[in-house]
Image (cartoon, rainbow, N blue to C red):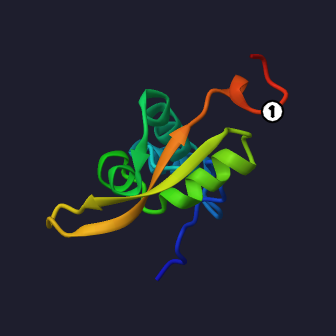
């Protein structure tokens, strides 16, 4: 049985050769691809945790938000909202909102 393959956060899977790497990325679910999908969606409007999981195929949206904020410098706010799951049950989830770069302190008016 082979060891599990893990994305190292840079779009590369540890322990996988170049040919295998390209096959794995055919599903376009590397951390980098996930961050890009999330950022593209945030540029269109707010995204909830539920929407990120369901529509953007992100298992851990909070992790991708953290990376976008702290590694890539994006200004992303979060507010708590009540949203229904597909089952109809309400859950308290994060709603993420991308702020334009020029609205933070020190930016252009």
Q: Nearer the viewer, residue 28 or 86?
A: 86
Compared across the picture, whether 4 is left or right of 102 comes to left
Image mark count: 1
**x%, y% of residue 24?**
47, 51
Q: Quadrant location of residue 74? A: top right
Mark 1 crowdedness (10 Å alpha carbons): few <14, some 14-19, many ≥20: few
Q: Which residue is at the front of the view, 107 or 68?
A: 107
- At x 37% / y 67%, what residue is drawn? 92
Q: What's the residue at 52%, 74% (across, down)? A: 4
**Image coordinates for residue 38, horizontal then vertical, percent:** 48, 41
Residue visible at 58% across and 46% down in the picture: 77
In the picture as drawn, the residue positioned furthest to the front comes out as 109
Residue 92, above or below 25: below
The location of residue 97, given as percent across then percent down, is: 51, 41
Q: Residue at horizontal 78%, vertical 17%?
A: 108
Give the structural element (helix, strand or loop) at label 1: loop
Q: 65 or 89: nearer the eye?
A: 89
Residue farthest to the bottom? 1
Q: Position of residue 70 (x, y in %)?
A: 74, 50
Work out whether 82 lies above or below 96: below
Horizontal side of 86 relative to 103 (left or right) equals left
Query: Left or right of 47: which side holds 34?
Result: right
Residue placed under numbered mark 1 in the picture: 105
Quarter of the image containing the C terminus? top right
């Amino acid at each position: 049985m082979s060891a599990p393959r893990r994305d190292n956060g840079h779009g590369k899977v540890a322990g996988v050769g170049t040919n295998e790497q390209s096959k794995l990325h055919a599903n376009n679910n590397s951390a980098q691809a996930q961050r890009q999908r999330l950022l593209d969606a945030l540029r269109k409007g707010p995204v909830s945790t539920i929407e990120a999981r369901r529509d953007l195929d992100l298992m851990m949206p909070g992790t991708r938000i953290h990376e976008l904020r702290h590694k890539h410098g994006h200004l992303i706010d979060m507010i708590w909202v009540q949203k229904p799951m597909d089952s109809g049950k309400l859950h308290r989830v994060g709603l993420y909102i991308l702020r334009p770069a020029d609205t933070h302190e020190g930016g252009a008016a």
